[in-house]
Image (cartoon, helix red, strand yellow):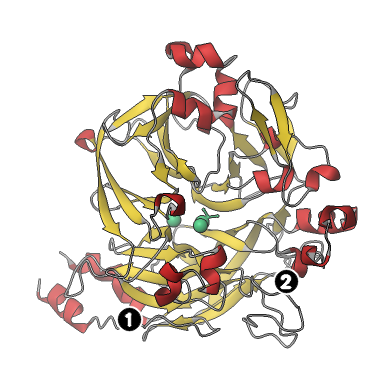
Amino acid sequence: SKERLQALKDLVLEGIPASDKDDLLLAKGLDYHTIVKWGDAISDTDTFGFNNDYTCFIPFDENNPKDGLLWVNHEYVNQLFVSDFDYRAFDNPKAHRTKAQVDKEMYNVGGSIIRIKEENGIWQVVQNDPHNRRITAQTDIALNWDAPIKGKTSVKGTLANCSGGITPWKTFITCEENYDGFFGETEYDDNNVESHRNSGYGWENFYNYPPEHYGWVVEVNPKDGKAQKHIALGRFAHECCTLYELEDKRVVAYTGDDHNDEHLYKFVSSKPGSLKEGTLYVADTINGQWLALDYENQPVLKAKFKNQTEVLIRAREAAKLIGATPLNRPEDIEIDPITGHIFITLTNNKPKGDHHGSILKIVETNGAFDALTFKSSTYIAGGTENGFSCPDNLAFDMAGNLWITTDMSGGAMNRTDKPYMAFKNNSLFVIPRLGKDAGKVIRVASAPKDAELTGPWFSPDGKTLFLSVQHPGEQTKDLSNPTSTWPFDKDNIPKPAVVAITGDLIEKMNHLNKLEG
Ligand code: FEO
Ligand code: CA
Ligand code: CA
Ligand code: CA
């Protein structure tokens, strides 16, 4: 239509160059304001946690997109900031740890539920709203499973909360990713004999919580904060969980294991609205098959494990036994709202020489999300040619434009790792679906020093992009001289925060599909 053509012509999408400036830089047509940051009071008793990652927003009323509940993941802590513990100062740091430090760290992971409201274009926390609460590493959480896990049907806390999702029945999903950093991991030798691998944080020296209680997909009820862990979806380093409701109300859940050479999974429920009854599959991307992690019907699993519960706890080992394809760290997953194709970021696999990662596209047979076969292909590769490296989070807007955040972490963040030097700070990109820039990768935001932009999520009216600025100043060695001072508070201490990005550009890009006619 004329209107659509005009809208496309009017849309000036001027990207910004790579930058190493310590600031949140935005393309023309975008503005931001901070909604909440680490340490802010959200109620009389609770404060906002550290290293916010995934964000999602559910309005109270579908007819009012400006008032609702924001869920925010708190993935991990920087001990220098959170618990005033500088492990670099000790030859044997673990001998110097105190319970008080660990308690602070346990408080600062998990998630936050916060009521936010938009007035005159500004999103603000509704102070002391009864919904505002923290879920921490000490919150009681039920297990949605018929058998106990390490003797328990309810466990303490959630941690390593990286990305997540939302259920068709409008509850929050938060995923436990690198759980082994907190309470370690149980390992098995060739004779199936258990041993404990210690964690980096060393929480197991203060609390006797089994590693098997972590590494799950967790659902949180926005209304009362009650949480449950969905054992049927398997235990591994879940980046995210992306759900789809079939016509008969059964649920399909895609979830990736963000670790070198680990796998992509899909759960298909056998009952409407269930995340317990159903089958967990793992992808063989070579042959385009979903392989069932089903103890009863897989002799190779029966030979190794005691029962289905053990298969789920040791999902990585089980997946390898039935022939799952190793992938380059599958992270976020999104379903294209227009084509129904499934997009999965493969962030990188440095030991295999893949420094820049790619985005994998999966097309289920006949477009059926419960299909057992599919076709896969690389949608786009990272690297200098396309201008981005290490894709992590994805979000489709209402018009089907694809937004991508990057995570060049660790050594790459110092830009001493050669492959990453040209890319400078982590960024937010968009690939427009239509118009003259269709298919191009355009940088629209650049993160402060050492930070990663995570958890992109659009408000229901398509006018706001919620975004986490995670770990600014992460490489700081001395608090009096931090590597970042964003968000530029008087104390000069960098703080992870959730921002609202607004402006003409967001609004226009979200509403292009309405003009398609
Ligand atoms: Fe926590 Fe895979 O990023
Ligand atoms: Ca991530
Ligand atoms: Ca996402
Ligand atoms: Ca990542």
Instruction: Say whether residue 125 is left or right of residue 157.
Output: left
Q: Is 269 located above or below residue 460 in the figure?
A: above
Q: Is 435 located above or below residue 115 in the figure?
A: below
- Measured as percent of width and height from the top left, residue 7 is found at 20, 78
Label 2: few (<14), some (14–19) or many (≥20) C-alpha neighbours in 10 Å: some
- Measured as percent of width and height from the top left, residue 108 is found at 73, 59
Mark 1 or mark 2: which is in front? Answer: 1
Secondary structure, mark 2, is: loop
Secondary structure, mark 1, is: loop
The residue type indicated by label 2 comes to: Asp
Residue 40 is labelled as: 2
The residue type indicated by label 1 comes to: Gly
- Measured as percent of width and height from the top left, residue 208 is found at 82, 37
Instruction: Work out whether mark 1 precedes mark 2 in sequence or the reverse, and give the earlier one.
Output: 1
Ligand 3 closer than 8 Å to label 1 CB? no
Ligand 1 closer than 8 Å to label 2 CB? no
Name the image quarter holding the C terminus: bottom left
What's the residue at 41%, 49% (across, down)? 352
What's the residue at 55%, 38% (across, down)? 236
- Measured as percent of width and height from the top left, residue 349 is found at 43, 52
Instruction: Say whether residue 495 is left or right of residue 237.
Output: right
What's the residue at 63%, 81% (across, down)? 484
Q: Quadrant of residue 97?
A: bottom right
| Residue 232 appears in the picture as rendered | no
What's the residue at 82%, 61% (across, down)? 45
Nearest to the observer: residue 427 or residue 110: 427
Residue farthest toward the left in the current orientation of the protein: 2
| Residue labelled with disc 1 | 15
Instruction: Say whether residue 28 is left or right of residue 80.
Output: left
